[in-house]
Amino acid sequence: MTTDNTSNTTSASNSDRPGDESDNILSYYAALECASAEMLQAARNGDWDSVCRLEGACAVVVARLRQIALQKPLREREQGTRLRILRAILANDAEIRRICEPLPAMLDPRSFVVGDVSATLH
Protein backbone atom coordinates (compact mmCIF):
# COMPACT_ATOMS: atom_id res chain seq x y z
CA MET A 1 0.00 0.00 0.00
CA THR A 2 1.14 3.50 -0.79
CA THR A 3 -0.25 6.71 0.62
CA ASP A 4 -0.58 9.91 -1.37
CA ASN A 5 0.13 12.59 1.23
CA THR A 6 -1.34 15.36 -0.91
CA SER A 7 -4.83 13.91 -0.89
CA ASN A 8 -4.74 11.60 2.14
CA THR A 9 -5.88 8.63 0.12
CA THR A 10 -4.53 5.13 0.23
CA SER A 11 -4.25 3.09 -2.94
CA ALA A 12 -2.96 -0.29 -3.93
CA SER A 13 0.49 -0.18 -5.49
CA ASN A 14 -0.77 -1.99 -8.58
CA SER A 15 -3.85 0.18 -9.16
CA ASP A 16 -2.86 0.81 -12.76
CA ARG A 17 -3.91 -2.73 -13.74
CA PRO A 18 -7.32 -3.00 -15.40
CA GLY A 19 -10.07 -4.09 -13.03
CA ASP A 20 -8.35 -3.12 -9.79
CA GLU A 21 -10.61 -0.13 -9.08
CA SER A 22 -13.82 -2.02 -9.79
CA ASP A 23 -12.53 -5.03 -7.86
CA ASN A 24 -11.98 -2.61 -4.98
CA ILE A 25 -15.57 -1.38 -5.30
CA LEU A 26 -16.86 -4.95 -5.32
CA SER A 27 -14.81 -5.63 -2.19
CA TYR A 28 -16.72 -2.84 -0.43
CA TYR A 29 -20.01 -4.40 -1.50
CA ALA A 30 -18.76 -7.80 -0.30
CA ALA A 31 -17.79 -6.26 3.05
CA LEU A 32 -21.31 -4.84 3.38
CA GLU A 33 -22.80 -8.24 2.58
CA CYS A 34 -20.65 -9.88 5.25
CA ALA A 35 -21.52 -7.20 7.81
CA SER A 36 -25.23 -7.54 7.06
CA ALA A 37 -25.00 -11.31 7.60
CA GLU A 38 -23.23 -10.65 10.93
CA MET A 39 -25.95 -8.15 11.86
CA LEU A 40 -28.62 -10.73 11.11
CA GLN A 41 -26.89 -13.31 13.27
CA ALA A 42 -26.51 -10.79 16.09
CA ALA A 43 -30.22 -9.88 15.80
CA ARG A 44 -31.19 -13.55 15.94
CA ASN A 45 -29.08 -13.83 19.11
CA GLY A 46 -30.62 -10.69 20.61
CA ASP A 47 -27.22 -8.97 20.63
CA TRP A 48 -28.49 -5.47 19.84
CA ASP A 49 -25.21 -3.80 20.83
CA SER A 50 -23.46 -5.70 18.05
CA VAL A 51 -26.26 -4.88 15.61
CA CYS A 52 -25.80 -1.17 16.36
CA ARG A 53 -22.02 -1.39 16.14
CA LEU A 54 -22.16 -3.18 12.80
CA GLU A 55 -24.77 -0.73 11.51
CA GLY A 56 -22.38 2.12 12.26
CA ALA A 57 -19.54 0.33 10.50
CA CYS A 58 -21.79 -0.22 7.47
CA ALA A 59 -22.62 3.48 7.33
CA VAL A 60 -18.91 4.29 7.09
CA VAL A 61 -18.40 1.73 4.31
CA VAL A 62 -21.45 3.01 2.41
CA ALA A 63 -20.17 6.60 2.60
CA ARG A 64 -16.78 5.53 1.26
CA LEU A 65 -18.39 3.38 -1.42
CA ARG A 66 -20.43 6.35 -2.64
CA GLN A 67 -17.26 8.41 -3.02
CA ILE A 68 -15.44 5.69 -4.91
CA ALA A 69 -18.40 4.83 -7.14
CA LEU A 70 -18.71 8.45 -8.25
CA GLN A 71 -15.06 8.47 -9.31
CA LYS A 72 -14.99 5.04 -10.94
CA PRO A 73 -18.35 3.30 -11.53
CA LEU A 74 -18.54 -0.45 -12.00
CA ARG A 75 -18.37 -1.87 -15.47
CA GLU A 76 -21.55 -3.35 -16.90
CA ARG A 77 -20.31 -6.94 -16.55
CA GLU A 78 -19.79 -6.38 -12.80
CA GLN A 79 -23.32 -5.14 -12.20
CA GLY A 80 -24.59 -8.72 -11.84
CA THR A 81 -22.30 -9.32 -8.88
CA ARG A 82 -23.31 -6.00 -7.37
CA LEU A 83 -27.02 -6.81 -7.75
CA ARG A 84 -26.59 -10.28 -6.21
CA ILE A 85 -24.85 -8.70 -3.21
CA LEU A 86 -27.49 -5.96 -2.88
CA ARG A 87 -30.29 -8.54 -2.95
CA ALA A 88 -28.59 -10.50 -0.17
CA ILE A 89 -28.15 -7.32 1.88
CA LEU A 90 -31.83 -6.41 1.40
CA ALA A 91 -32.94 -9.91 2.41
CA ASN A 92 -30.81 -9.71 5.57
CA ASP A 93 -32.15 -6.23 6.32
CA ALA A 94 -35.75 -7.40 5.93
CA GLU A 95 -35.15 -10.30 8.31
CA ILE A 96 -33.48 -8.00 10.85
CA ARG A 97 -36.44 -5.63 10.67
CA ARG A 98 -38.84 -8.55 11.12
CA ILE A 99 -36.93 -9.63 14.24
CA CYS A 100 -36.76 -6.20 15.86
CA GLU A 101 -40.16 -4.92 14.72
CA PRO A 102 -42.42 -8.00 14.69
CA LEU A 103 -45.89 -7.59 13.28
CA PRO A 104 -48.77 -8.01 15.67
CA ALA A 105 -49.86 -11.64 15.67
CA MET A 106 -53.13 -10.89 13.91
CA LEU A 107 -51.30 -9.23 11.00
CA ASP A 108 -48.55 -11.81 10.65
CA PRO A 109 -49.59 -14.19 7.84
CA ARG A 110 -47.65 -17.02 9.48
CA SER A 111 -49.97 -16.94 12.48
CA PHE A 112 -53.21 -17.53 10.59
CA VAL A 113 -54.99 -20.71 11.49
CA VAL A 114 -56.99 -22.38 8.77
CA GLY A 115 -60.51 -23.04 9.95
CA ASP A 116 -64.05 -21.79 9.95
CA VAL A 117 -63.78 -18.02 10.36
CA SER A 118 -67.54 -17.47 9.87
CA ALA A 119 -68.15 -18.27 13.53
CA THR A 120 -65.94 -15.37 14.61
CA LEU A 121 -67.31 -12.76 12.20
CA HIS A 122 -70.31 -10.71 13.28
Image: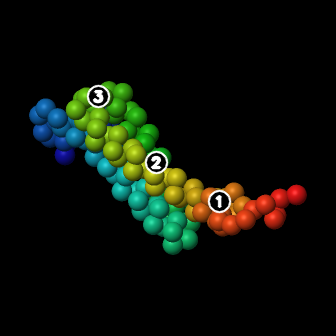
Classify mark 2: helix, strand or loop.
Answer: helix
Relative to 93, residue 99 above or below: below
Instruction: Using residue 104 as the reference point, say whether residue 41 is left or right of it.
Output: left
* Tag 3 residue: 72
Badge 3 amino acid: Lys
* C-alpha distance separating marks 2 and 1: 20 Å
Q: Position of residue 5 (x, y in %)?
A: 27, 36
Residue that appears at 88% across and 58% down? 122
The local secondary structure at tag 3 comes to loop
At label 1, which amino acid type do we have?
Answer: Asp
Compared with 92, 28 (above or below) is: above
* Mark number displayed over residue 108: 1
* Disc 2 residue crowd, few under 14, some 14–19, many 20+, Cα 10 Å: few
Q: How many marks?
A: 3
Pointer 2 residue: 90
Question: Does the image show residue 5?
Answer: no
Which percent across, then down, holds residue 4? 25, 36
Residue 106's place in the image compared with 31, above or below, is below
Where residue 47 appears, x then y in whole percent? 53, 70
Task: State which quadrant residue 9 falls in.
Answer: top left
Report, in whole angstroms, how far the alpha carbon at label 3 lies from the one at label 1.
43 Å
Question: Hey, which quadrant is residue 119 in on the image?
Answer: bottom right
How packed mark 1 is, by other alpha carbons closer than 10 Å (few <14, some 14-19, many 20 or more), is few
- Which is more toward the observer, 111 or 94? 111
Please tell me which residue is depicted at 52% across the width and 53% down the height of the picture: 94
Whichever of callouts 2 and 1 sits on the residue coming sooner in the sequence is 2
Residue type at mark 2?
A: Leu
Q: Who's the residue at 22% across and 40% down the image?
A: 23
Q: Residue at x 65, y 65 (%)?
A: 114
**Where, by quadrant of the figure, is residue 65 drawn?**
top left
Q: Residue furthest bottom?
A: 45
Q: Earlier in the sequence, mark 3 or mark 1?
A: 3
